């Protein structure tokens, strides 16, 4: 599993002009799933995400988590995070889980985050052509892979 985590002032995702998810201050999480991802990897990523200390404390140091600041999380599925582009000019997406595998992983990941945060986690629409808008705060952007 690979995620791109962006600390945001606000973010939203739309499909065909309809907003499917939006948040205020918190984290926008782009999430890609591999065929061999499992509950253990999802749990690791969800816990890491909610505990990652990338929000500023009173002294301006990144020392607080999204939980600490009562922030929100928006999750958007993005299979292109698992693209292989070292050879040639057309990325290969064979490293990404196909929808029958990825959809349940995505749904389980969102449920884990909701349980850990104690709040609803808005999302995009799996497999749709989505438009994501955000105001990156910092900017803070972190790429995080689950352990093997």
Image: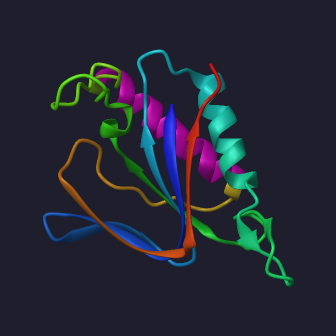
Prevalent SS, magenta region: helix
**Where 112 sits versus 35, above or below?**
below
User: What residue sits 16% from the left and 71% below the top?
Assistant: 17
Percent position (x, y) of residue 13?
A: 32, 65
**The furthest residue to the top:** 36
Tell whether 13 sits left or right of 44: left
Q: Is residue 40 above or below residue 109?
A: above
Q: Position of residue 128 (x, y in %)?
A: 20, 48
Residue lying furthest right = 59
Q: Is residue 109 shown in magenta?
A: yes
Seen at 37% across and 70% down, the residue is 12
For the point 69% across and 64% down, which residue is it? 66
Q: Residue at 71% of width from left, 72% of height from top?
A: 70
Q: Quadrant of the C terminus?
A: top right
Q: Which residues are magenta?
A: 100-116
Q: Nearer the viewer, residue 85 or 29?
A: 85
Does the segment drawn in magenta span residue 27?
no
Q: Nearer the viewer, residue 13 or 139?
A: 139
Q: Classify residue 38 as left or right of residue 127.
A: right
Where is residue 104 drawn, in percent x and y?
Answer: 42, 29
Q: Is residue 96 left or right of residue 93?
A: right
Counting from the top left corner in percent of width and height, residue 31 is at 44, 43
């Amino acid at each position: 599993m690979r995620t791109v985590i962006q600390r945001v002032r606000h973010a939203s995702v739309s499909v065909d002009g309809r907003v499917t998810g939006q948040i205020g201050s918190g984290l926008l999480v782009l999430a890609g799933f591999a065929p061999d991802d499992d509950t253990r990897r999802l749990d690791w990523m969800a816990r890491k995400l909610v505990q990652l200390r990338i929000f500023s404390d009173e002294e301006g140091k990144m020392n607080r988590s999204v939980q600490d600041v009562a922030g929100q999380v928006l999750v958007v599925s993005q299979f292109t995070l698992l693209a292989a582009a070292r050879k040639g000019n057309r990325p290969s997406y064979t490293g990404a889980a196909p929808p029958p595998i990825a959809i349940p992983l995505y749904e389980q990941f969102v449920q884990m985050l909701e349980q850990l945060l104690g709040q609803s986690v808005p999302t995009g629409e799996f497999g749709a052509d989505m438009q994501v808008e955000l105001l990156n705060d910092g900017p803070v952007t972190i790429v995080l892979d689950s352990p093997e």
